[in-house]
Image (tube, rainbow, N blue to C red):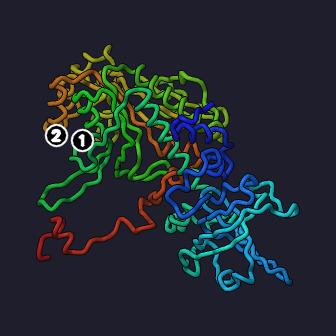
Amino acid sequence: MLSSLAPRWLMVRSVLSQIPYKCSTIATDTINKLGSGSCSHSYRSHLCGELTESNLGETVTLCGWTRKKRLLGEGIDIAFVPLGDHSGTVQLTCDSGKWANLIESLRTETVVMARGVVKARPEKDRNSSMHTGGVEVEVESLEVLNEISPKLPFLPSTKGLVVTEELRLRERQLELRTPHTQRNLRLRSEVAMAMREYLAHEHGFVEVETPTLFKRTSEGSREFIVPTRKPGKFYSLAQSPQQFKQLLMVGGIDRYFQFARCYRDEDMRSDRQPEFTQVDLEMSFVDMEGVIGMIEGLLSTTLTQLTPHLHIPPTPFPRMTYNTAMEKYKSDKPDTREDRSDSSTLNFLWVVDFPLFTRNKDTHKLESTHHPFTAPHPDHQQLIYSSDQSKLENIRSLHYDLVVNGVELGGGSIRIHSEDLQRDVFKNILKVPVEEFSHLLRGLSSGCPPHGGIALGFDRLMAVLCQSSSVREVIAFPKSYQSKDLLTGAPSSLDKQTLATYHIIPKNN
Ligand code: ASP
């Protein structure tokens, strides 16, 4: 039982857990249990989807978007105008004699404010499949708050709406209004809230923001470059907060997390976006078991409460070595489900014992399998100094990936905390300029605790939880498959003057 003193997030969390996932009235039920908090500081007294027989006789003020109106002709001067918001829809009944002009010109999806009395619907008109199906609001005043364009590209409230993805992304502001997208974004918000609570309040993590305007380093992925007004000087957008979070450990933050925005200029896939969100964390004085145990606790606690429609296997999640995964599944992110189409079972799997280095097929150079900061397994540490190249490829690392149903959900590692070892890896094996990382090396030599961490792809996690085939379904303003923002038109061209200001073309061109 929740006490009335329970924090609001906990109440929301508990309420969401009682709602079948496929139910599009997820918000309605939440609101009903929460009372009218959503109406404070607002024109309205109630949300459209929360009215029931318990409100009979009350005068209410509602705001929302009109759905398709229905006029009852032949001498009965009544117009039915369903009014909806994120919580659901309620039927307004209007005297179409009194409101004749307004009703006639009222277009579907117009924003209105209506004041009226909650009445019971006649028995024959009751709709038991709607939360508000037993009531209607007899309108006393009706005001259009904003006119809409005569022809919207599509009507988000249409049942079974079929619209191309291109149009949906271009008109994302309308798509956001659909119950499907509302449900995804609201669940995303609840999961983020519950994760913050678990990490910060239950496990002593500190949420810290790190810079996204960073400098280019040979960390792994291809980065976006940001020109500046200083000739020849560029920022690089952070591909992850990796180096900063390690420096936070040096700085005694001890346990860090962040819902971090990351940028990678990589080829697009259905589970990739050029900018994406990671649940990024780092812990001091920890080994691999500590990080793995923390993530298992985080996921099982959060998901058991918020996504009861999904089957989450008990912890500890199974583990498989990289070699077994490659031999048995020919993939380092094996899908271990018995059925490939069952999206309601989440087969979490840890893949461990990755090689520390992998040889690039094109350049034949050794590269970090994870990233250059990953520690070798202690039993293999001495092999770093071997002159035998084949031995280097056999070094096992303290890197772990979390996979769910064939999707790589995240990865992390125990890090190198010795400056000497890190320098040797950069210089002798990866052959990258050590100066690029002088800030990190200074950190490692200034009292760096043993540490490790992980990052979970939050968009990917939400796509799995929402049973969506693409991360675009769970991001408010995603880029298209071609990496374009179809809503705003980014990336866009720049005029010559701007290009010259940023020294991309010569001045006076
Ligand atoms: N920074 C790593 C990544 O983005 C995650 C980690 O090692 O914690 O993949």
Task: Answer above or below: position of 152 versus 53.
Answer: below
Say if mark 1 contacts mark 2, CB within 8 Å: yes
Q: Residue 340 location in percent, x, y? A: 64, 39
- Name the residue located 66 percent from the left edge and 52 percent from the top edge: 25
- Place residue 440 in its image quadrant: top left
Looking at the rendered image, the quarter that the N terminus falls into is: top right
Q: Nearer the viewer, residue 290 or 122?
A: 122
- Name the residue located 41 percent from the left edge and 24 percent from the top edge: 291
Q: Residue 193 location in percent, x, y? A: 48, 40
Tell me the crowding category of disc 1: few under 14, some 14 to 19, or many 20 or more residues within 10 angstroms, Cα based.
some
Mark yes or no: residue 393 visible: no
- Place residue 343 in its image quadrant: top right
Q: Nearer the viewer, residue 343 or 48?
A: 48
Residue behind mark 1: 218
Q: Residue 103 location in percent, x, y? A: 68, 80
Q: Is residue 195 left or right of residue 444?
A: right
Q: Is residue 382 left or right of residue 6?
A: left
